[in-house]
Amino acid sequence: MFAEERHRHIADLVGVQGRVGVNELAELFSITQETVRRDLATLEEDHILRRVHGGAVALDRLSRSEPSLSVRQTQRLDEKQRIAMAAMALIPAAQTVSILLDSGSTTGALAEQLAGWTPASPGDELLAITNSLPIASSLSNNTNLLLDILGGRVRGLTSAVVGARATEQLSGLRPDIAFIGANGIHSEFGLSTPDPVEAATKTAMVRAARQVVILADASKLGAETLVRFATLEDVDTLITTTEPSPDLAAALAAAGVEVVLA
């Protein structure tokens, strides 16, 4: 195989997997690790990927890389719908239930399901609390729901209400379940997101809730972004769409996290 063809294959793998390892590529192409490193150096110079210890990552896996909410709402739609349906199954049919919805495209998919919620029995109440302007707008049309929105500064990129006022309000709440999104879930680093202010709001959500459920499609597994907002031990349930890698699966099991595949 010519180097140019190999480079295209490596670029395709990084695009699909988000990360590739030197050993993995050396075995795949039957070449030396030194040749792999030269290939990765060339691809980095061409702004195709970024080299890291032991391999390379896609440019959208950089620690501060964060697509806008409008972009994320067009990606992995089938996965997000499956996650949302699995999350709905965790909301108990009870007389009074309170849930907290983080901002994001996957939690937004859950909000779409909740937009059609009706009580299982007369008098049942479901209170939804959110820091997301789009989610609040979507849920406001369902008169069967009770809806609270946190106050504070709106972060334009994600349409999330963040900042000191939001975190202060969260410190006085104890919702039954928090459904939270993450940009990265890593065996050692835990759960992360690129923005420090939004990370602080997520941390406050995790601390507030009786049960913490992470909604994350397969692209978030194994990823690390700039700011950790929770450890794996802080999480009760992860709903995702593919089996985690062996190291992440072991870390989740050790932390007592239930993994639900949607």
Image (cartoon, helix red, strand yellow):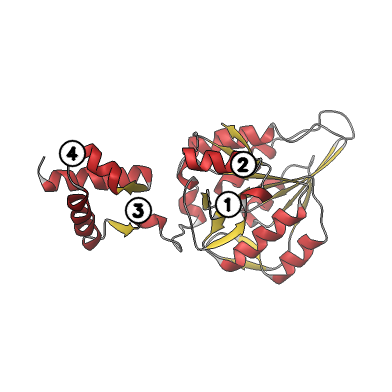
Write the residue at 35% across / 53% down: 57
Identity, as a three-letter code, of the amino acid under mark 4 = Ser
Which element is circle 4 on? loop
Q: Position of residue 215 (x, y in %)?
A: 59, 43
* Sequence order check, earlier mark of 2 and 4: 4
**Marks 1 and 4: CB-CB under 8 Å?**
no
Above-or-below relation of 116 to 35: above
Viewer-closest of 145 and 79: 79
Identity, as a three-letter code, of the amino acid under mark 1 = Gly
Instruction: Count neighbours of disc 2 (C-alpha within 10 A) and say few if under 14, some if 14 to 19, many if 20 or more.
Output: few
The dot on residue 30 is 4
Outermost residue toward the top? 121
Above-or-below relation of 245 to 224: above
Instruction: Count neighbours of disc 4 (C-alpha within 10 A) and say few if under 14, some if 14 to 19, many if 20 or more.
Output: few
The dot on residue 254 is 2
**Marks 1 and 2: CB-CB under 8 Å?**
no
Outermost residue toward the right? 123
Q: Quadrant of the C terminus?
A: top right
* Sequence order check, earlier mark of 3 and 1: 3
